[in-house]
Amino acid sequence: MNDLPTDPDTDDGALLSVRGVDVGYRTGRRAHVTAVHDVSFDLHPGQSMALVGESGCGKTTLGLGLLRLLPRTGVIPKGEILFRRKDGTRVDVRTLHKERLRRFRWSEAAMVFQGAMNAFNPVLRVEDHFVDTFRAHEGGGRRPRREILEESAELLEMVRLDPARVLNAFPHELSGGMRQRSLIALALALRPRLLILDEPTTALDLLTQRSIVERLAELRERLRFSMVFITHDLGLAAALADRVGTMYAGRLIETGTTRDIFHRSRHPYTSALIDSVPPVVGDLRVPESLPGGPPSLHALPPGCSFAPRCAHALPACDLTRPELDVLVPRDEGLAHAAACLRSTDAELHAEGASR
Ligand SMILES: Nc1ncnc2c1ncn2[C@@H]1O[C@H](COP(=O)(O)OP(=O)(O)OP(=O)(O)O)[C@@H](O)[C@H]1O
Ligand SMILES: [Mg+2]
Protein backbone atom coordinates (compact mmCIF):
# COMPACT_ATOMS: atom_id res chain seq x y z
CA MET A 1 0.00 0.00 0.00
CA ASN A 2 1.89 2.99 1.21
CA ASP A 3 4.95 1.03 2.21
CA LEU A 4 7.71 1.84 -0.19
CA PRO A 5 10.43 -0.31 -1.65
CA THR A 6 13.99 0.81 -1.05
CA ASP A 7 15.01 3.41 -3.55
CA PRO A 8 18.75 3.80 -4.24
CA ASP A 9 18.36 7.59 -4.23
CA THR A 10 17.04 7.83 -0.72
CA ASP A 11 19.20 7.78 2.33
CA ASP A 12 18.32 4.54 4.07
CA GLY A 13 19.41 5.65 7.52
CA ALA A 14 17.30 8.81 7.40
CA LEU A 15 14.20 9.20 9.53
CA LEU A 16 12.86 11.81 7.15
CA SER A 17 13.84 12.27 3.50
CA VAL A 18 12.26 15.28 1.88
CA ARG A 19 12.61 15.23 -1.89
CA GLY A 20 11.75 18.09 -4.23
CA VAL A 21 8.75 19.27 -2.22
CA ASP A 22 6.63 22.24 -3.25
CA VAL A 23 3.97 23.58 -0.92
CA GLY A 24 1.42 26.20 -1.86
CA TYR A 25 -1.95 27.73 -1.19
CA ARG A 26 -4.88 27.61 -3.55
CA THR A 27 -5.90 30.97 -4.90
CA GLY A 28 -8.66 29.78 -7.22
CA ARG A 29 -10.24 26.64 -8.54
CA ARG A 30 -7.13 25.51 -10.40
CA ALA A 31 -4.54 28.07 -9.38
CA HIS A 32 -2.23 28.14 -6.41
CA VAL A 33 0.65 30.25 -5.24
CA THR A 34 3.81 28.32 -4.37
CA ALA A 35 5.18 29.29 -0.97
CA VAL A 36 7.81 26.54 -0.69
CA HIS A 37 9.83 25.51 -3.74
CA ASP A 38 11.65 22.28 -4.40
CA VAL A 39 12.90 21.60 -0.88
CA SER A 40 15.02 18.50 -0.28
CA PHE A 41 16.86 17.37 2.85
CA ASP A 42 17.48 14.31 5.01
CA LEU A 43 17.05 14.22 8.75
CA HIS A 44 18.60 11.35 10.64
CA PRO A 45 17.39 9.82 13.91
CA GLY A 46 18.21 12.03 16.87
CA GLN A 47 19.27 15.01 14.74
CA SER A 48 17.94 18.49 15.29
CA MET A 49 17.66 20.95 12.47
CA ALA A 50 16.87 24.64 12.76
CA LEU A 51 15.04 26.34 9.90
CA VAL A 52 15.85 30.03 9.83
CA GLY A 53 14.97 32.94 7.59
CA GLU A 54 12.98 36.15 7.44
CA SER A 55 9.28 36.39 8.05
CA GLY A 56 7.28 35.04 5.11
CA CYS A 57 10.05 32.85 3.68
CA GLY A 58 7.97 29.69 4.07
CA LYS A 59 9.21 28.10 7.30
CA THR A 60 5.78 27.46 8.79
CA THR A 61 4.38 26.37 5.43
CA LEU A 62 7.15 23.79 5.10
CA GLY A 63 6.72 22.57 8.71
CA LEU A 64 2.97 22.21 8.30
CA GLY A 65 3.41 20.56 4.92
CA LEU A 66 5.76 17.91 6.32
CA LEU A 67 2.99 16.67 8.61
CA ARG A 68 0.14 17.54 6.24
CA LEU A 69 -1.26 20.00 8.73
CA LEU A 70 -1.83 22.79 6.23
CA PRO A 71 -5.07 24.76 6.21
CA ARG A 72 -7.75 23.67 3.76
CA THR A 73 -6.32 25.78 0.97
CA GLY A 74 -2.85 24.22 1.37
CA VAL A 75 -1.52 21.98 -1.40
CA ILE A 76 1.61 19.88 -1.87
CA PRO A 77 1.69 19.67 -5.67
CA LYS A 78 4.99 17.83 -5.91
CA GLY A 79 7.69 15.94 -4.09
CA GLU A 80 8.07 13.14 -1.59
CA ILE A 81 8.08 13.24 2.20
CA LEU A 82 9.50 9.85 3.11
CA PHE A 83 9.32 8.88 6.74
CA ARG A 84 10.77 5.78 8.40
CA ARG A 85 8.19 4.53 10.90
CA LYS A 86 8.83 2.83 14.23
CA ASP A 87 8.18 -0.55 12.62
CA GLY A 88 10.93 0.14 10.06
CA THR A 89 8.65 0.58 7.06
CA ARG A 90 8.77 3.77 5.07
CA VAL A 91 5.81 5.86 3.99
CA ASP A 92 5.37 8.91 1.82
CA VAL A 93 3.49 11.27 4.11
CA ARG A 94 2.30 13.13 1.04
CA THR A 95 0.21 10.17 -0.08
CA LEU A 96 -1.05 8.89 3.29
CA HIS A 97 -4.80 8.54 3.49
CA LYS A 98 -6.95 9.86 6.26
CA GLU A 99 -6.79 7.09 8.87
CA ARG A 100 -3.11 6.35 8.30
CA LEU A 101 -2.33 10.03 8.42
CA ARG A 102 -4.18 10.36 11.73
CA ARG A 103 -2.17 7.48 13.18
CA PHE A 104 1.04 8.89 11.78
CA ARG A 105 0.55 12.20 13.54
CA TRP A 106 1.28 12.21 17.24
CA SER A 107 2.56 8.64 17.34
CA GLU A 108 5.28 9.04 14.68
CA ALA A 109 5.58 12.81 14.38
CA ALA A 110 4.08 15.74 16.28
CA MET A 111 4.11 19.50 15.98
CA VAL A 112 4.03 22.39 18.41
CA PHE A 113 2.50 25.24 16.45
CA GLN A 114 3.54 28.85 16.09
CA GLY A 115 1.57 30.83 18.68
CA ALA A 116 0.81 27.51 20.34
CA MET A 117 0.31 28.96 23.75
CA ASN A 118 -3.29 29.46 22.79
CA ALA A 119 -3.56 25.94 21.40
CA PHE A 120 -5.14 24.57 24.57
CA ASN A 121 -8.89 24.52 24.72
CA PRO A 122 -9.60 27.13 27.41
CA VAL A 123 -12.52 25.27 28.95
CA LEU A 124 -10.66 21.99 29.46
CA ARG A 125 -8.23 21.25 32.26
CA VAL A 126 -4.72 20.27 31.15
CA GLU A 127 -5.34 16.67 32.24
CA ASP A 128 -8.27 16.39 29.83
CA HIS A 129 -6.00 17.37 26.95
CA PHE A 130 -3.68 14.50 27.86
CA VAL A 131 -6.53 12.02 28.29
CA ASP A 132 -8.09 13.04 24.97
CA THR A 133 -4.77 12.74 23.17
CA PHE A 134 -4.01 9.27 24.52
CA ARG A 135 -7.54 8.03 23.96
CA ALA A 136 -7.77 9.38 20.42
CA HIS A 137 -4.84 7.18 19.47
CA GLU A 138 -5.64 4.04 21.38
CA GLY A 139 -6.36 0.91 19.46
CA GLY A 140 -9.02 -1.18 21.15
CA GLY A 141 -9.89 -1.00 24.84
CA ARG A 142 -9.97 2.23 26.79
CA ARG A 143 -7.01 2.73 29.03
CA PRO A 144 -7.89 3.60 32.60
CA ARG A 145 -7.78 7.34 33.23
CA ARG A 146 -5.52 6.78 36.24
CA GLU A 147 -2.92 5.08 34.08
CA ILE A 148 -3.01 7.87 31.50
CA LEU A 149 -2.60 10.49 34.21
CA GLU A 150 0.39 8.65 35.65
CA GLU A 151 2.07 8.71 32.27
CA SER A 152 1.11 12.36 31.75
CA ALA A 153 2.62 13.22 35.13
CA GLU A 154 5.87 11.58 34.04
CA LEU A 155 5.91 13.66 30.86
CA LEU A 156 5.27 16.86 32.79
CA GLU A 157 8.05 16.01 35.21
CA MET A 158 10.37 15.67 32.23
CA VAL A 159 9.69 19.30 31.35
CA ARG A 160 10.15 20.14 35.05
CA LEU A 161 6.56 21.01 35.81
CA ASP A 162 4.70 20.00 38.95
CA PRO A 163 2.11 17.52 37.63
CA ALA A 164 -0.16 17.83 40.66
CA ARG A 165 -0.58 21.50 39.98
CA VAL A 166 -0.51 21.54 36.19
CA LEU A 167 -2.79 18.60 35.37
CA ASN A 168 -5.55 20.04 37.44
CA ALA A 169 -5.24 23.58 36.09
CA PHE A 170 -7.11 25.34 33.34
CA PRO A 171 -4.77 26.72 30.67
CA HIS A 172 -5.30 30.36 31.75
CA GLU A 173 -4.08 29.50 35.24
CA LEU A 174 -0.62 28.73 33.88
CA SER A 175 2.08 31.17 32.83
CA GLY A 176 3.07 31.33 29.15
CA GLY A 177 6.24 29.34 29.81
CA MET A 178 4.34 26.65 31.73
CA ARG A 179 1.78 26.37 28.95
CA GLN A 180 4.49 26.05 26.35
CA ARG A 181 6.26 23.34 28.35
CA SER A 182 2.92 21.54 28.86
CA LEU A 183 2.36 21.60 25.12
CA ILE A 184 5.77 20.15 24.46
CA ALA A 185 5.00 17.38 26.99
CA LEU A 186 1.68 16.77 25.28
CA ALA A 187 3.29 16.61 21.83
CA LEU A 188 5.64 13.93 23.19
CA ALA A 189 2.84 11.91 24.77
CA LEU A 190 2.85 9.17 22.14
CA ARG A 191 6.63 9.19 21.88
CA PRO A 192 6.93 10.52 18.33
CA ARG A 193 10.31 10.15 16.66
CA LEU A 194 10.03 13.57 15.04
CA LEU A 195 9.00 16.77 16.76
CA ILE A 196 8.45 19.93 14.75
CA LEU A 197 8.43 23.11 16.80
CA ASP A 198 7.41 26.39 15.21
CA GLU A 199 8.89 29.35 17.10
CA PRO A 200 8.81 27.49 20.40
CA THR A 201 10.05 30.38 22.49
CA THR A 202 8.74 33.49 20.78
CA ALA A 203 6.73 35.72 23.11
CA LEU A 204 8.48 34.35 26.19
CA ASP A 205 10.90 36.30 28.32
CA LEU A 206 14.59 35.47 28.07
CA LEU A 207 14.84 33.34 31.19
CA THR A 208 11.79 31.33 30.23
CA GLN A 209 13.17 30.93 26.72
CA ARG A 210 16.37 29.58 28.15
CA SER A 211 14.54 27.15 30.39
CA ILE A 212 12.51 25.81 27.43
CA VAL A 213 15.68 25.38 25.41
CA GLU A 214 17.30 23.46 28.25
CA ARG A 215 14.24 21.23 28.67
CA LEU A 216 14.18 20.49 24.95
CA ALA A 217 17.85 19.58 24.94
CA GLU A 218 17.36 17.26 27.95
CA LEU A 219 14.28 15.66 26.43
CA ARG A 220 16.01 15.00 23.17
CA GLU A 221 18.91 13.40 24.99
CA ARG A 222 16.53 11.21 26.94
CA LEU A 223 13.91 10.30 24.35
CA ARG A 224 16.12 10.53 21.27
CA PHE A 225 13.63 12.07 18.91
CA SER A 226 14.61 14.16 15.89
CA MET A 227 13.64 17.75 15.83
CA VAL A 228 12.94 20.41 13.24
CA PHE A 229 12.58 23.75 14.87
CA ILE A 230 11.62 26.87 13.15
CA THR A 231 12.97 30.05 14.57
CA HIS A 232 13.88 33.65 13.95
CA ASP A 233 16.32 33.36 16.73
CA LEU A 234 19.79 32.43 15.60
CA GLY A 235 20.95 32.17 19.22
CA LEU A 236 18.39 29.44 19.73
CA ALA A 237 19.46 27.73 16.53
CA ALA A 238 23.08 27.75 17.69
CA ALA A 239 22.12 26.37 21.09
CA LEU A 240 19.83 23.57 19.98
CA ALA A 241 20.63 22.55 16.44
CA ASP A 242 23.08 20.06 15.01
CA ARG A 243 22.42 21.66 11.68
CA VAL A 244 20.77 24.67 10.17
CA GLY A 245 18.80 25.26 6.99
CA THR A 246 18.39 28.83 5.75
CA MET A 247 15.28 29.60 3.74
CA TYR A 248 14.77 32.51 1.41
CA ALA A 249 11.68 33.18 -0.72
CA GLY A 250 10.43 29.63 -0.24
CA ARG A 251 13.68 27.85 -1.02
CA LEU A 252 16.28 26.16 1.09
CA ILE A 253 19.31 28.20 0.08
CA GLU A 254 21.94 26.92 2.46
CA THR A 255 22.26 23.93 4.74
CA GLY A 256 25.06 22.59 6.85
CA THR A 257 26.16 21.80 10.36
CA THR A 258 25.66 24.56 12.89
CA ARG A 259 29.41 25.17 12.68
CA ASP A 260 29.32 25.46 8.88
CA ILE A 261 26.52 27.96 9.01
CA PHE A 262 27.83 30.13 11.82
CA HIS A 263 31.53 30.01 10.99
CA ARG A 264 31.81 29.54 7.24
CA SER A 265 28.52 30.36 5.67
CA ARG A 266 28.67 30.38 1.87
CA HIS A 267 25.47 32.22 1.07
CA PRO A 268 25.44 36.02 1.40
CA TYR A 269 21.91 35.90 2.80
CA THR A 270 22.89 33.55 5.63
CA SER A 271 25.91 35.74 6.33
CA ALA A 272 23.71 38.83 6.43
CA LEU A 273 21.31 37.13 8.86
CA ILE A 274 24.17 36.20 11.14
CA ASP A 275 25.78 39.63 10.95
CA SER A 276 22.48 41.29 11.77
CA VAL A 277 22.06 39.63 15.14
CA PRO A 278 24.16 40.14 18.24
CA PRO A 279 25.64 36.82 19.36
CA VAL A 280 23.24 36.50 22.29
CA VAL A 281 19.65 35.32 22.25
CA GLY A 282 17.42 37.96 20.72
CA ASP A 283 14.67 38.43 18.20
CA LEU A 284 15.76 38.73 14.61
CA ARG A 285 14.88 42.00 13.01
CA VAL A 286 15.02 42.49 9.28
CA PRO A 287 18.77 42.92 8.98
CA GLU A 288 19.75 46.55 8.89
CA SER A 289 22.59 45.85 6.51
CA LEU A 290 20.17 44.33 4.03
CA PRO A 291 18.23 46.76 1.87
CA GLY A 292 14.74 46.00 0.60
CA GLY A 293 12.61 43.01 1.39
CA PRO A 294 12.04 39.51 0.05
CA PRO A 295 10.31 39.27 -3.34
CA SER A 296 6.60 38.69 -3.67
CA LEU A 297 5.63 35.05 -4.16
CA HIS A 298 3.69 36.21 -7.20
CA ALA A 299 6.67 37.82 -8.86
CA LEU A 300 9.83 35.88 -8.16
CA PRO A 301 12.81 37.08 -10.18
CA PRO A 302 14.02 34.65 -12.85
CA GLY A 303 17.51 34.23 -11.41
CA CYS A 304 18.54 34.07 -7.78
CA SER A 305 15.68 35.43 -5.63
CA PHE A 306 18.19 37.13 -3.37
CA ALA A 307 20.17 38.84 -6.16
CA PRO A 308 18.22 42.14 -6.04
CA ARG A 309 19.34 42.64 -2.41
CA CYS A 310 22.75 41.02 -2.63
CA ALA A 311 25.86 43.18 -2.34
CA HIS A 312 27.89 40.53 -4.18
CA ALA A 313 25.55 39.79 -7.10
CA LEU A 314 27.02 39.44 -10.58
CA PRO A 315 25.05 39.99 -13.79
CA ALA A 316 24.70 36.19 -14.14
CA CYS A 317 22.85 36.02 -10.81
CA ASP A 318 19.87 37.81 -12.36
CA LEU A 319 19.67 35.23 -15.12
CA THR A 320 20.31 31.84 -13.58
CA ARG A 321 18.85 30.42 -10.41
CA PRO A 322 21.64 28.59 -8.61
CA GLU A 323 21.12 25.01 -7.45
CA LEU A 324 21.77 23.97 -3.88
CA ASP A 325 25.26 22.63 -4.60
CA VAL A 326 27.18 20.46 -2.17
CA LEU A 327 30.39 22.16 -1.05
CA VAL A 328 31.46 19.71 1.63
CA PRO A 329 30.00 16.22 1.27
CA ARG A 330 29.18 14.47 4.54
CA ASP A 331 27.03 11.51 5.48
CA GLU A 332 23.79 11.58 7.42
CA GLY A 333 22.42 14.60 5.58
CA LEU A 334 25.09 16.82 7.12
CA ALA A 335 26.69 18.06 3.88
CA HIS A 336 27.33 21.77 3.57
CA ALA A 337 25.46 23.02 0.52
CA ALA A 338 24.64 26.49 -0.76
CA ALA A 339 22.62 27.87 -3.65
CA CYS A 340 24.87 30.71 -4.74
CA LEU A 341 26.87 31.20 -7.91
CA ARG A 342 29.67 32.59 -5.78
CA SER A 343 29.66 29.89 -3.10
CA THR A 344 33.14 28.73 -4.09
CA ASP A 345 34.48 32.17 -4.93
CA ALA A 346 37.74 32.40 -3.00
CA GLU A 347 37.77 36.19 -3.07
CA LEU A 348 34.33 36.48 -1.54
CA HIS A 349 34.92 33.90 1.14
CA ALA A 350 38.53 34.58 1.98
CA GLU A 351 37.66 36.07 5.36
CA GLY A 352 35.09 33.41 6.16
CA ALA A 353 37.48 30.64 5.17
CA SER A 354 40.07 31.77 7.66
CA ARG A 355 37.57 32.04 10.52
N1 LIG B 1 -3.12 30.30 4.60
C1 LIG B 1 -2.41 30.94 3.68
N2 LIG B 1 -2.95 31.28 2.48
C2 LIG B 1 -2.22 31.91 1.53
N3 LIG B 1 -0.92 32.25 1.67
C3 LIG B 1 -0.34 31.96 2.83
C4 LIG B 1 -1.04 31.29 3.91
N4 LIG B 1 -0.17 31.13 4.93
C5 LIG B 1 0.99 31.67 4.53
N5 LIG B 1 0.90 32.15 3.28
C6 LIG B 1 1.97 32.80 2.50
O1 LIG B 1 3.02 31.88 2.34
C7 LIG B 1 4.28 32.53 2.50
C8 LIG B 1 5.07 31.83 3.57
O2 LIG B 1 4.44 32.04 4.82
P1 LIG B 1 4.90 31.30 6.14
O3 LIG B 1 3.88 31.60 7.18
O4 LIG B 1 5.18 29.90 5.84
O5 LIG B 1 6.27 32.06 6.45
P2 LIG B 1 7.19 32.00 7.74
O6 LIG B 1 8.57 31.85 7.25
O7 LIG B 1 6.68 30.98 8.69
O8 LIG B 1 7.01 33.46 8.35
P3 LIG B 1 7.05 33.93 9.88
O9 LIG B 1 8.49 33.97 10.25
O10 LIG B 1 6.44 35.28 9.84
O11 LIG B 1 6.25 32.96 10.70
C9 LIG B 1 3.98 33.99 2.81
O12 LIG B 1 4.10 34.72 1.63
C10 LIG B 1 2.55 33.97 3.28
O13 LIG B 1 1.91 35.16 2.94
MG1 LIG C 1 5.93 31.08 10.58
Image (cartoon, grey):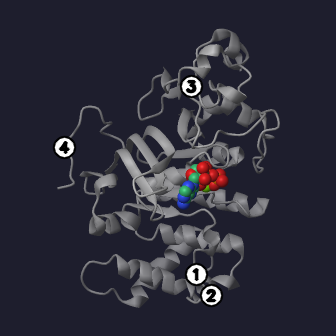
Q: Quadrant of the C terminus?
A: top right
- The residue that disc 1 covers is 163
Mark 1 or 3, nearer chain start: 1
Which residue lies at the image location 48% right of the left edge and 40% below the top edge?
A: 37
Q: Identify which amino acid the numbered label 4 is placed on.
A: Pro
Rendered image: mark on residue 303:
3
- Alpha-carbon span between mark 2 and mark 4: 47 Å
- The residue that disc 2 covers is 169
* Disc 3 residue crowd, few under 14, some 14–19, many 20+, Cα 10 Å: some
Tag 2 and tag 1, C-beta contact below 8 Å:
no
Q: Identify which amino acid the numbered label 1 is placed on.
A: Pro
Is 76 placed left or right of 318 in the picture?
left
Is 194 placed left or right of 296 in the picture?
left
Using the image, determine if residue 244 lies above or below residue 157.
above
Instruction: Report the mark closest to the observer, 4 or 1.
Output: 4
Residue 54: x and y in percent read 67, 44
Residue 192: x and y in percent read 41, 62
